[in-house]
């Protein structure tokens, strides 16, 4: 289905929604989108889109993990964490951020440390 055909079909659905509500001349965008996303076929499309988008963002975040800045550990990227140098400067966790610009801003506030060094930092122990 082309974009034009899809647009026409969408407009026809919107017109049917409006016709079904004699007391309303127009349906608000929020109401229309709520009804649109409630349809099973649209929910499935959205779900697949989100999976792809979040996988891309996760890979983007992982690309910043090279090695621990304290001990140099680099064997396993899953064992590397982002540590906020200034804890009160934290906007959101990286998993909660949904665009690359905000991810870049948040990562600029962090250092990459391995799990062991991260725990030592938070337990206030010093490195020997």
Image (cartoon, grey):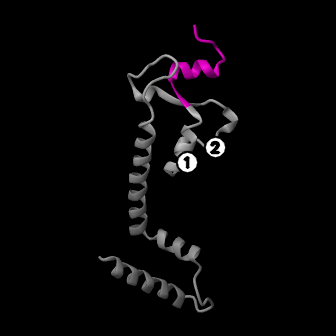
Among the 4 quarters of the image, the one containing residue 109: top right
**Above or below — where is 111 with respect to 39?**
above
Look at the image and tell me in which quarter the C terminus lies.
top right
**Above or below — where is 27 with respect to 47?**
below
**Above or below — where is 80 with respect to 21?**
above
Image mark for residue 91: 2
Point out residue 43 in the picture as x, y percentages from the top left corner.
43, 64
Instruction: Please name whichever residue, 110 or 125, is drawn nearer the observer in this view of the structure.
Output: 110
Which residue corresponds to mark 1?
A: 102
Q: Which of marks 1 and 2 is in front?
A: 1
- Circle 1 Cα neighbour tier, 10 Å, few/some/many (<14 / 14–19 / ≥20): some
Residues marked 1 and 2 touching at CB (< 8 Å):
yes
Range of the magenta residues?
A: 111-128
Tell me the residue at 59%/17% (across/down). Answer: 120
Point out residue 36 in the picture as x, y percentages from the top left corner.
48, 73
**In the current view of this chain or complex, which residue is farthest to the right?**
88
Horizontal arrangement in the rendering, residue 21 relative to residue 12 (left or right): right
**In the current view of this chain or complex, which residue is farthest to the left?**
1
């Amino acid at each position: 289905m082309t974009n034009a055909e899809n647009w026409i079909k969408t407009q026809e659905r919107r017109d049917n929604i409006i016709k079904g509500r004699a007391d309303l001349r127009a349906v608000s965008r929020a109401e229309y989108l709520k009804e649109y996303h409630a349809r099973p076929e649209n929910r499935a499309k959205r779900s697949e889109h989100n999976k792809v988008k979040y996988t891309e963002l996760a890979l983007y975040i992982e690309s910043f993990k090279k090695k621990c800045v304290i001990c140099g550990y680099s064997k396993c990227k899953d064992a590397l964490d982002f540590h906020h140098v200034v804890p009160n400067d934290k906007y959101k966790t990286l998993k909660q951020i949904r665009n690359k610009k905000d991810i870049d801003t948040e990562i600029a506030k962090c250092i990459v440390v391995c799990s062991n060094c991260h725990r030592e930092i938070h337990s206030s122990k010093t490195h020997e």
